Image (spheres, rainbow, N blue to C red):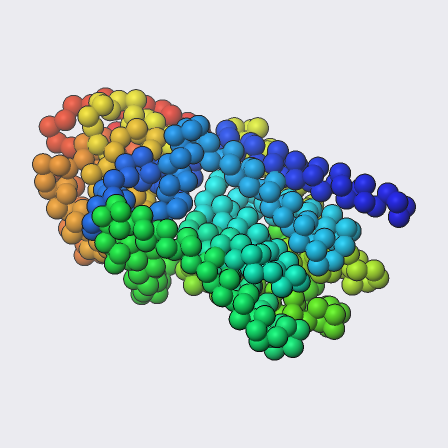
């Protein structure tokens, strides 16, 4: 048995990585999410301007993720990034197993690989869509691994690479700073416990900070070279989040509360909170031998949990941010003998079973033809009767519908939160609808007064003056057509037979 263990690890971890890759491939056949569609539209029309990072459309994301969408789309079309996402999941399994090998043993590596495969393929989080949270994870985990190795070997080059990897991660999603938090906590706790000298602490810190600064310097250099004002860049990446947070706090939303509750259920159902719960309960077991690592893991988990809550909207993808701490907690406990290790292994098994059950459930729904394609059906219905020169604007933030129409929007907001924050009373939208550049089609997916009663009433007045109702969306909502324009009626593109109708 002892002789078979290295061979078992040698094959089981790559096989687990392959499984993680294969379980993401069905996403190549599902509709793009609103975020994916929106990022793709921004990438396709990206022309930097001094006062606008991305030109016509506004999005509160760093240039790095939009550039990634642009490159993937140029190479393989809209779904190329889904394949990249599958490769990312396989890489995450390998990185997690490597971390477990460094801080524990081969048995821990096998179990840690399983928990990552389970979480990245669970349909309770997101088993097909690819956004910033997922794309940033290899760099966060890579930073954690490199930081541990840099500390063990007291290596400045490894510390610089750890900083570089950690600095790349927030280029995909701003709050993915966990790699920096983990590395900083690791060094500070090592200094506090006198495991390293002040001089070593200084050397590794300087190297790490130098590495972390490289992505930021490159982004600033790009902005200066492209003519984008630095305050404009800052606002798009971080400044807007403050304004958006104030907007979310000022308006109570049942949808937000429901999403928060669903997210909490998913955190339990996927096993993330169970893993961290076992880790906390058994803290004393590993504290005696790995104080620094335990402290850094707790700091990482607390930071990511707070970042999740401050995100405000509670989308399920936010749970990916908790994966690095989950990896470290599993790695420290899963290989232990006795009840401690057994408890963590049971939780990992439950996470795997939960993932398989969620995949099977979605598979059944897909096989019966009742799976939703979001708003893409409505977009395709409009595309079938629209002219090439037509434009379309969607109220309610559904870029998947917009992309499916194959038409641009003269309105700069493809998401509801930027619209609510930057055009709260619809003044910009009303001016557009009253102007010669008014869109040919206007799709009203939500009541006009949902976010602003007064602004919504004035918007509805403009709509009734300049547009006629010309059908209904697959999932509700009115399709408006500008006065004086003759187009066919959108026909049935809805899987459940609820065709748009006048």
Instruction: Tell whether 54 sits left or right of 22.
Output: left
Q: Residue at horizontal 33%, vertical 63%? A: 242
Can residue 378 be seen? no
Give coordinates of residue 99: x percent, y percent: 66, 54
| Residue under the point 58% across and 53% down | 141
Q: Quadrant of residue 155?
A: bottom right
Q: Position of residue 98 (x, y in %)?
A: 67, 50
At which x and y percent is residue 306?
49, 65
Q: Nearer the viewer, residue 380 or 456?
A: 380
Number of numbered discs: 0
Q: Nearer the viewer, residue 192 or 279?
A: 192
Q: Nearer the viewer, residue 456 or 68?
A: 68
- Above or below: residue 298 compared with residue 327: below
- At 26% from the left and 47% from the top, the residue drawn is 225
Which percent across, then down, holds residue 203? 54, 67
The residue lying at 66 percent from left, 62 percent from top is: 152
Q: Nearer the viewer, residue 147 or 268?
A: 147
- Say above or below: 345 vs 442: below
Q: Is residue 429 in view?
A: yes
User: The C terminus appears in which quarter of the rendering?
Assistant: top left
Against 432, is 299 above or below? below
């Amino acid at each position: 048995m002892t002789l078979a263990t290295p061979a078992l690890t040698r094959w089981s971890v790559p096989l687990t990585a392959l499984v993680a890759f294969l379980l993401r491939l069905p996403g190549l056949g599902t509709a793009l999410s609103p975020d994916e569609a929106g990022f793709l539209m921004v990438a396709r029309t990206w022309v930097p301007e001094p006062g606008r990072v991305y030109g016509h459309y506004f999005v509160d994301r760093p240039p790095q993720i939009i550039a990634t969408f642009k490159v993937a789309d140029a190479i393989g079309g809209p779904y190329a990034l889904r394949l990249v996402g599958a490769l990312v999941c396989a890489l995450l399994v390998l990185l997690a197993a490597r971390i477990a090998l460094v801080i524990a043993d081969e048995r821990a590596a096998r179990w840690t690989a399983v928990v990552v495969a389970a979480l990245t393929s669970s349909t309770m989080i997101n088993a097909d869509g690819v956004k910033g949270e997922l794309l940033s994870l290899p760099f966060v985990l890579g930073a954690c691994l490199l930081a541990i190795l840099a500390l063990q070997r007291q290596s400045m080059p490894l510390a610089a690479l750890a900083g570089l990897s950690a600095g790349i991660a927030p280029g995909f999603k701003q709050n993915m700073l966990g790699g920096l938090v983990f590395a900083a906590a690791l060094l500070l706790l090592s200094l506090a416990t006198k495991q390293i000298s002040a001089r070593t602490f200084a050397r590794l810190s300087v190297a790490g900070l130098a590495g972390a600064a490289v992505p930021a310097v490159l982004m600033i250099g790009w902005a200066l070279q492209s003519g984008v004002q630095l305050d404009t860049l800052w606002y798009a990446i971080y400044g807007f989040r403050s304004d958006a947070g104030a907007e979310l706090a000022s308006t109570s939303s049942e949808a937000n509360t429901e999403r928060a509750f669903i997210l909490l259920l998913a955190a339990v159902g996927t096993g993330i909170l169970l893993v961290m719960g076992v880790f906390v309960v058994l803290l004393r077991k590993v504290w005696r031998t790995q104080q620094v690592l335990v402290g850094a893991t707790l700091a990482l988990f607390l930071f990511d949990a707070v970042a999740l809550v401050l995100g405000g909207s509670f989308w399920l993808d936010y749970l990916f941010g908790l994966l690095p701490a989950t990896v470290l907690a599993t790695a420290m406990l899963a290989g232990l003998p006795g009840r401690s290790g057994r408890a963590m292994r049971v939780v990992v098994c439950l996470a795997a079973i939960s993932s398989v059950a969620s995949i099977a459930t979605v598979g059944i729904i897909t096989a019966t033809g009742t799976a939703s394609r979001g708003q893409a059906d409505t977009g395709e219905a409009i595309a079938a009767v629209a002219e090439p020169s037509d434009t379309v604007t969607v109220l309610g933030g559904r870029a998947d519908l917009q992309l499916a129409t194959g038409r641009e929007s003269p309105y700069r907001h493809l998401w509801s939160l930027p619209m609510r924050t930057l055009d709260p009373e619809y003044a910009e939208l009303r001016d557009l609808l009253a102007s010669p550049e008014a869109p040919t089609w206007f799709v009203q997916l939500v009541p006009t007064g949902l976010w602003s009663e007064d602004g919504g009433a004035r918007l509805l007045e403009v709509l009734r003056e300049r547009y006629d109702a010309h059908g209904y969306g697959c999932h509700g909502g009115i399709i408006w057509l500008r006065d004086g324009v003759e187009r066919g009626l959108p026909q049935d593109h809805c899987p459940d037979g609820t065709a748009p109708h006048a």
